[in-house]
Image (tube, rainbow, N blue to C red):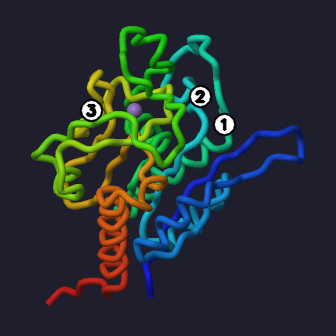
Amino acid sequence: MKPLVALSMSRDNQSEGASRDFLRTTYVDAVIQAGAIPVLLPNVPVSVELLRRCDGLILTGGGDVDPAMFGAEDEGTQWAGVSRERDAAEHLFVQEAETLGMPVFGICRGIQVLAVAYGGTLIQDIPRRRPDSPIAHSQRARRQQPTHEVTVDESSRLAQILGETRIAVNSFHHQAIDRVPEGWRVVAQAPDQIVEAMEYPGDRLLFGVQWHPEDLVGDRVEAQRLFRAFVDACRAFQARKGEPWPTSP
Ligand SMILES: [Mn+2]
């Protein structure tokens, strides 16, 4: 059976009874293209039970993380799409994936959720913190259009997966990682030193990117490699799960 890849979802926080959990179809298509079956996780605690039946977790893009999640005061920036239910649900997903030793891939908001869940902090608004930056991290070009470069650490697992150390990426974020959690490595940066990828060293594939590879898989081979490498890790996890418990001789 193909591996099951769990995907977190956005929540639009409408008035009572009108809220929706939703996900752009490019995530679903990218997972299918890489050879796995997508499983969508609604923003409710019981989704952890669904995650347990899956072989990997993709934390998807979306609205801002509530600064209370990383113990910061609200700096008064323009908040976009904050959902406390989503923040809480994804925190549970990361904890469960950690307990299971499951592969995790964070995308855009997803890398930020990983950073916060493992004890890091976020820049709440890049233009405010870095007014000198010449890079437009909130690009106006279409989603499939790369607009800035990232430099990837050549000794990283990410560089191995991409097969490149310089790639062009799209960019739709006004938040970014500030303090990197303990034990994690920054493995890619934009020309203005904004963190664009981080990974946790070790056998388990646990990493995140700040760009949106799901929008680039149509014609960018390095974006396809990210999803393929992740699905390979999910397949390996699935195979290990199927093994009987080791017995003593
Ligand atoms: Mn960027």
Q: Is residue 112 visible?
A: yes
Q: CA distance from mark 2 to mark 1?
A: 7 Å
Q: Are marks 2 and 1 in contact (CB under 8 Å)?
A: yes
* Mark 3 beta carbon near ligand 1 (under 8 Å): no
Label 1 or label 3, whichever lies nearer to me, is 3
Q: Earlier in the sequence, mark 2 or mark 1?
A: 2
* Location of mark 1 (residue): 84
Q: CA distance from mark 1 to mark 3?
A: 29 Å
Ligand 1, by image quadrant, is: top left
Residue 29 relative to residue 155: left or right: right
Q: Is residue 91 visible?
A: no
**Quadrant in which the C terminus is drawn:** bottom left
Which residue sits at x=44%, y=34%?
116
Type of amino acid at the residue the image marks with label 3: Gln
* Residue 137 placement: quadrant: top left
Residue 46 image offset from top left, x and y in percent: 65, 60
* Residue 1 placement: quadrant: bottom left
Given the current orientation, which residue lies at the most extreme bottom position? Answer: 249
Q: Earlier in the sequence, mark 1 or mark 3?
A: 1
Measured along the vertical axis of the image, is residue 183 above or below residue 100?
above
Which residue sits at x=29%, y=21%?
192
Label 2 or label 3, whichever lies nearer to me, is 3
Q: Which of the numbered marks, if any, corresponds to residue 189?
A: 3
Say few, some or many: other residues with alpha carbon within 10 Å of mark 1 (under 14 / 14 to 19 / 20 or more). Answer: some
Type of amino acid at the residue the image marks with label 2: Asp
